[in-house]
Image (cartoon, coloured by chain):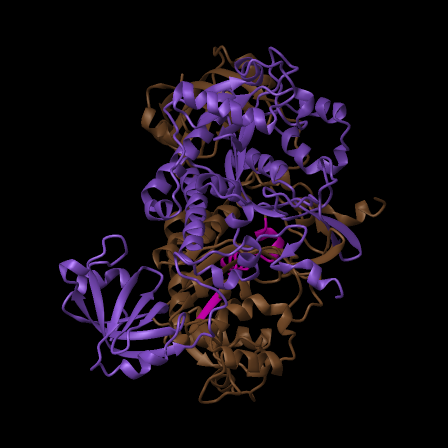
Chain colours: A purple, B brown
Amino acid sequence: MERTLISELGQKVGEVALIKGWVSVRRDQGKMVFFDFRDRSSSVQGVVLPNSAAIEIAKEIRQEYVVSVEGKVNQRPEKNRNDKVQNGDIELEVLQITVLAKAEPLPFDMSLEGYNLELTAELDHRALTLRHPRLQAIFKIQATIIDSFREYMKSQDFFEFQAPSIVPAVAEGGAEVFQVDYFDKKAYLSQSPQLYKQIVMTAFERVFSVNKIFRAEPSATTRHLTEVVSLDAEMGFIDSWHDVRDMSEATVRHILNELGKKCAKELELMGATLPQMIENTPTLSLTEAFAKLQIPADKDLNPEQERKLCEVIKEETGSDFVYIYGYPTRQKPFYVYPNPEEPEFNEGMDLLCRGVEWLSGGRRINDYAQLMEHVQKWEMDPQKIEMFLEAFRYGAPPEGGFAFGSERMTMQILGLKNIREATMFPRDMNRIDGLLSQDTDE
Amino acid sequence: MERTLISELGQKVGEVALIKGWVSVRRDQGKMVFFDFRDRSSSVQGVVLPNSAAIEIAKEIRQEYVVSVEGKVNQRPEKNRNDKVQNGDIELEVLQITVLAKAEPLPFDMSLEGYNLELTAELDHRALTLRHPRLQAIFKIQATIIDSFREYMKSQDFFEFQAPSIVPAVAEGGAEVFQVDYFDKKAYLSQSPQLYKQIVMTAFERVFSVNKIFRAEPSATTRHLTEVVSLDAEMGFIDSWHDVRDMSEATVRHILNELGKKCAKELELMGATLPQMIENTPTLSLTEAFAKLQIPADKDLNPEQERKLCEVIKEETGSDFVYIYGYPTRQKPFYVYPNPEEPEFNEGMDLLCRGVEWLSGGRRINDYAQLMEHVQKWEMDPQKIEMFLEAFRYGAPPEGGFAFGSERMTMQILGLKNIREATMFPRDMNRIDGLLSQDTDE
């Protein structure tokens, strides 16, 4: 008999079907045994009646056993229906069970309600905890964010490229970069695909990439990881930075719409509501932002000010989002485009949501002479960015782009307290899979 | 006036349109100036007539200048049509040109016919050579391979996860692994997401990832890179390794079909024909393969034998592909499933195409006791793979998977001589963007 996915059992009421999956729950009621079976598609209750051929083996089966089950799909009587769970209106009357793999007794409660691990323990047992509905929901939401980003980029004619992870030298700063033993030389892990995406833009006009970036920040806060997935876009032939703003806004809007459509169940399980993006996201210069907060202007908003500003904007407009643009030129990287009317401020921008920065971007310098001027002013070594400079030496259109982290967005949408919860295999200064202190004697 | 993409000019014959793009070619014929303009969508010939307001500026413009051009779209007279180029039936009569960015004189011929760089020079000037139609074709084909892989996986209910790049310790072997200075400890760059995809499979049943893998092979051959993009899949609840074979075959078939549909122009430009995949790809055990070659059986086919076998199969069946399965168990990693009837051979498999291995995979051990037996026999440290072992300790279904490299497949389909041609930013022991020897004094 061919396997039926559990999500399709509802279409086979009255028939015998074969399912394969894991045992989430087993309730032995003496004469009868009840199970919750789950596969990748859904879950369903099974009942083994006292006279079933499967009653003996049902007594042996434990949580997380992998089984193949033949059973009759029955409609549940009205009084036993449970609208709150998947397949709450049907039940599988088990005729036969085959054990495909056994499981050792679980080290902690994995039930939906009973699961209550500290984050450290959750990460120590990542291989097992990934099976919990909460974690499944988190990573389904994250996969949907990443996929909808790509989907929207492709619909807007952006070309996908693979940004490199190993880089030759550190163009900007460099304190927080990982060093790699590269044969008898030194190489580094990429902190950002920024210069690469600008290069590829000069050849393909509109480009995007989904890529790893690495930061060697010796910090164990709830918001820092050493390896994250960055979603990057860059577009040529813009008329102004507003085109970049608009493209980033449309991208975020598409992602939120897709989450609403594809992850409604997961958002509900997590008790999360999607942030509200109104038709025109409020957009303030940094100077205007400080004026709105009625405090003196400074180089940047601090986290407390970001929170406050988002509250004010939410109250005034209903928007959970606000764009800030026009940062002090010298505070930002050399490639950010200075406002021609007011060159001490640039055309970089950030998108804040519910008090936290989600996305950064803006217009970049495309004129080679202006770029070289900045390279000098920023005291950079042109040799180290020669490939980047070559791209602009031979004709680059007015351009800009944006980037955001998939983990940060997942964390913010779900209101998670720690970014490690939004990462399947989080790496930080103390942990790579297991805690690193356990390995010091290696 | 709003920008028109060059690919859409054909719909505006008789109208005035605004295009933006690069100058690929400029032919100054004294009284008139001819241009080839290109944007991300296509290219078109422009002509500046002697009485045009743009004739002065047209004289100043050089190759790769970035321009905004207003012109009238004219049908070309029959005798001037060129069916071999895009938009060969129309011409843009230039009314106005604005220079958006200048370009320095090109260091070499970038025309379709005249381009003739050695690979080393091509890589030294990657930022510029990426604009050449040949390179654009290569990377469009590669992007299509990667995207069609994801597309097919999603259609088959596979869940996308992000495999980590930084790993704690080297489970198998370890000679060819890059070491990272990880704060005051050591970490490594992932050589394969193998164990991670098996872990995630135990939670999501069917999983895939597009991820970087790293190999520190001190080898400068035409087939080795230190950083490549691996396309990985893993599926639970298989009945036998044939299910993995079938899924991998369907995946490759989908990719080839999509390439045929979406990249016909690029394949033609490259003079490439897609390999022939017949309805049932021939599938031989390693023993049968040696028998067919009429040579004594050995541990594996060498490259010459792989080529020969593919020739024989092609002649016999018309298929460019052949699966080989059943390798000596002890020659392969600990997780590969031994054939229960003949345990000295395993259920690992390779897919060869036109003489070269494209894809590897097979069934894995899912039974925890059997896995632990192999861990011992292979003399592995269970501590180093504790997270992996945990996944299988708590119930894992019969399973298998496969993997292939996007660069290798691009190279083989296009008949490229060097894998560096199939990588936008190739890294090897001598090069990361620029040649590393230039940096030895840093």
Depth check, front residue: B75 or A324: A324
Depth check, front residue: B356 or B224: B224
Question: For residue B403: magenta?
Answer: yes
The picture places residue A372, in percent across and down from the top left corner, at 71, 25
- Look at the picture and state if B109 lies above or below B415: above
The picture places residue B417, in percent across and down from the top left corner, at 60, 58
Residue B431 lies left or right of residue A404; in this view the side is right
Residue at 67% in and 40% down: B125
Question: For residue B82: magenta?
Answer: no
Residue A293: in sight, yes or no?
A: yes
- Look at the picture and state if B64 lies above or below B259: above
Q: What is the quadrant of the N terminus of chain B in the image? A: top left
The picture places residue B281, in percent across and down from the top left corner, at 39, 72
The picture places residue A37, in percent across and down from the top left corner, at 32, 67
The quadrant holding residue A11 is: bottom left
Q: In this picture, which residue range is highlighted in magenta?
A: B400-423
Residue at 34% in and 19% down: B15
- Look at the picture and state if A20 lies above or below B222: below
Residue B360: in sight, yes or no?
A: no
